[in-house]
Image (tube, rainbow, N blue to C red):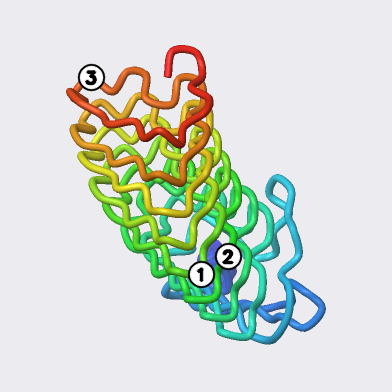
Amino acid sequence: IYMKQFYLLLITLLVSLSAYAEESGTCGDNLQWKLTDEGVLTITGTGEMQDWGGDSRPWPPYRNVKQVIIGDGVTTIGKRAFSNCSSLTSVTIGNGVITIGWGAFYNCPYLTSVTIGNGVTTIGGMAFYRCFSLTSVTIPNSVTTIGSGAFSNCRSLTSITIPNSVTTIGNSAFYDCRSLTSVTIPNGVTTIGDWAFRGCSSLASITIPNSVTTIGKNAFSDCKALTSMTIPNSVMTIGNEA
């Protein structure tokens, strides 16, 4: 009986140890991933990361991922690559990344720190949706498009720097960012999408440049702290309930 209990205990211990062993694999034609037992997930190699659907990603189990480091050779972050990583707190994106895919960091509620490399041109739709703990983001001068819902429901986001390179702020891009207090939209932006800043209830100041031609419907609805706004003569279209 005691020997049987000993073997059961030994098997349990071995299974437990194997669960936290370092794991690795591929995530693109020329990309490799490695997850340490401390929860650090590193992506290295060259080229594009593949897209993922649901929980098809290879790094197991995703809830143990605490830090993500994307190497300089990586050119794209795949669709839903790190979505629902409930333990993720820190992300570093290398300078070689051009596109952050749709929902790449969707619903990472404890993500507090993001460093976006200087090569990114597109922040995809829903890329940082529901990242409730994210307080600030610096978007590099390479970015031209902030996709639909990219930072929607980032309820702790207090400041955002939008560079002059950005031409499009997508629909619902900053929807329900209720801690955001001020935004400067740079010269170069032509379109402020539908619902772009809806529900930003702390937003007290907004500057709209002469480059803007379209303000989408509900763009600033429910911005309860906003007391004044100057709309330049360049604006040709203002959507319903803007």
Which badge, 1 or 3, comes first in the chain's sequence?
A: 1
> Which residue occupies the foreground of this view, 51 or 18?
51
Image position, residue 138 (x, y; %): 35, 63
60 shown above or below 223: below
Q: Mark 3 = which residue?
A: 224
Q: Answer few, some or many: residues within 10 Å of disc 1's Cα (few below 14, many 20 plus, some between 14 and 19).
A: some
Is 61 drawn above or below residue 54 in the view shown?
below
Give percent across and percent down for residue 127: 54, 50
Of all residues, the one furthest to the top in this rendering is 241
Q: Are marks 1 and 2 in contact (CB under 8 Å)?
A: yes
Q: Residues within 10 Å of mark 2 (few under 14, many from 20)?
A: many
Q: Is residue 190 left or right of residue 25?
A: left
Location of mark 2 (residue) = 121
- Identity of the residue drawn at 46% across and 32% down: 235
Quadrant housing the N terminus: bottom right
Query: Where does the image place residue 64, in percent across and percent down from the top left?
Result: 48, 61
Count the numbered circles shown. Answer: 3
